[in-house]
Amino acid sequence: MKARRIASIAVLCCAASSVLAADSDAVCPPLPVFEPPATGSQWPEGSYRGEADHLETLEDGRVRLRGDVEIEDAERRLQADSAQIDRQLGHVTFDGDLLLESAQMRIEASGGELDQSSGEGSFRGARYQLNESRGNGYADAILTPKPNVTLLDGAMYTTCLPEEPEWALYMSRLYLDQDEGMGTAHHMRLHLWGVPVFYWPWMTFPINDERKTGLLFPSFAHSDDGGFEYAQPIYWNIAPQADATITPRYIENRGTQANLEMRYLNNWGEFQANGSQLDDRLYGDDRWLTAFEHSGRLGAGWSTYLDTQRVSDSDYFGDLDTGLPLGGEPVHLLSQGGVRYSGAIWRHQIGVQRYQTVDESIAAVNRPYAKEPFVRSTAVYDFHQYEFNLKAETVDFSHDQKVQGQRLDLYPSIARTFGTPGWFVRPKAGVRHTAYQLDQLSATTEEAPSRSTAIASLDSGLVFERQTRSGLLHTLEPRLYGLYVQEQDQSQIPLFDTGSYTFSYDQLFRENRFTSADRQADAEQVTAGLTTRWLDGNYEERVSASIGRIYYLGDREVTLDESQPAETGEASDIAALLRAQLTQRWRADANWQYSRDREELLSHSYQLRYKDASRRILNLGYREVEAGVQRANSEARQQAEIATVLPLGTRWQWFGRYFYDLIDERPLETFAGFSYQSCCWAASFIARRQLDLDSAMPNVEEYDTDYLLQFTFRGLGSVGDDNERALDRGILGYAEER
């Protein structure tokens, strides 16, 4: 049984920007709004205005102001109990309480000095508020020794309310250089709810978008199998266009893992490399992961791409968090790379593709082919209302256990569309030629089989419209699609990468019921379809319903496997779908596959969604598929789902999902949790239980249980699991509300 994750704590970053949702301001008291007295153009450079209850000119030319003193220029306003102004030097000294306001900052202090011409100054016993980031705090002294440089002694910083901050940074000295974009903190302590939890004797960090080499915040975790974990990211700013993050990760029961992420970006493209290595004492072997991703721009329509993933063993993703967006525990890892060209008429792609089968229970003979290499070209050319198309592909397939070889596929065609907004007719004709050169042959396989097939189709449709009394535009759109494909014996052609499409309404209008070139379906058929829509005044679709069926004029002799009998039915199953935006908040979707021969629904699914401006979400779903419908030997499925997000006031939110298998009478996934959001911090907790479908004992129900806890501190970073990613995957529509 896989380990149950008891808890996980990880500080992800430290930044000046907010990591809470933008609407967190809804639970925060509004900040004071500074209104400049006038635009800068109305003030002569270096000038200011002052007023007070009492004004006195001293013998040395200085001016003393007392009682409700206010001094302002184009960008700042200062209020104080009393002040002395040296008009020759532009120097102002304040006694007693003062308030300095600007668009960027608000400072309250017990006294200070200010040079109006240079902006240099000092303030004693100061409290400050940063208006853009909601950052605030206090300092024993705030000094501005030169322009764009600020020095704070005995400083505190937080984004919480200043009276009782839930989190705060305390520093003996903080030096901020806006020209260099860097801040330096000495003897910095992080307090959470008044308790010190971290200490750094010295730290530098960027205060703008510039990057800087140094330590990032560490992470901590604990699991039953691994025990205590500690990871320390080290950021390396290699160059303006390149950086790297090196993360040693100590896992108590496994050993020390080395992790590396490198990134490169310039005008010609971007590149990212990830790698991990661990000599795992618990597993008893060396374990590793590599991933590379690249996209390049060569100019003149040419580009390059590379996307590879490799892993040491099938248990890697379950035992060790990769941090890569691979979608859980994949069965196959794709590695591919190549060159693309995109022009006005031609598109080309040259590349290679290879899979690593992570699931070792899949027999070698059933694993995917490699494509080493493949070349694809497509062309679309319009000439006097005629559309000329060419699809061409050549692939070299390789496999250790099965027949392999080269495949050439050519499909030129010509089409023309006639019609008006109320009707259309589109005839199309082409020839598809596919040829092979094979090796590793069986005794009954030809070395160079080929197939040439004529394909002709006629697509047509009408569009009827009427205006309803409710103001909606109602359409009725019948469609007829005739298809003829010449029958060819394809029993000598191997299956390299070809399967069957899942039956659906859109599949009724395809030229081929198979997914790739190893099989071209024979056809003498007519598809009848009917779509009706209701459109509002902005021509946005409110309701759409479609129903269709294929009528066969002959048997379908071509099958995936020569052992399968020909299909002799006179008509296909009936496919239907419904899309309805019932109200601004409610939406419904449904799909049906109905068999007239068996007089029953072979598959049907329903989904009802609710979403409103208050971020309330409700998803209800049901799906049923009969055995053997999706593919040969596939099992029947009958599943139901409910998922919801329910805000409880402005701060609390509850969410959950229940995904149930009605045939086996067992839950497939269940999770529930809550989140809390205040002005400066947020927390979320998820309890999740998932059925382990990859269990070594398929007849034994085995569940993995996780408890996910995350804290987010506005302006500081996050502590814990990435709960948002789990909710994005589990609740449809949640990501749209973030």
Image (cartoon, helix red, strand yellow):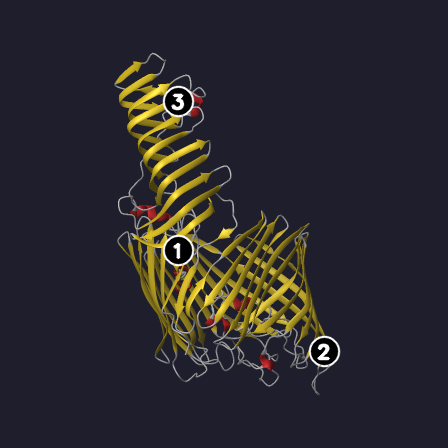
Q: Which mark, residue 718?
A: 1
Tag of residue 91: 3
- Residue on which disc 2 sits: 438
Seen in the image, is 482 located left or right of residue 533? right
What separation in Å lies between label 1 and label 2 (alpha carbons)? 56 Å
Quarter holding residue 58: top left
User: Which residue in the rendered view is the most extreme toward the top?
Assistant: 59
| Mark 3: amino acid | His
Q: Which of marks 2 and 3 is in front?
A: 3
Give residue 118's position: percent from left, percent from top. 45, 26
Pick the quarter of the image with the C terminus.
bottom left
Is disc 1 placed on a helix, strand or loop?
strand
- Going by the numbered disc 1, the residue's amino acid type is Ser
For disc 3, the neighbor class at 10 Å (few under 14, some 14 to 19, many from 20) is some
- Going from the N terminus, do you reach mark 1 or mark 2 first? 2
In the depicted view, which residue is nearer to us: 630 or 199?
199
Residue 364 lies, in percent from the top left, at 59, 81
The N terminus: image quadrant: bottom left
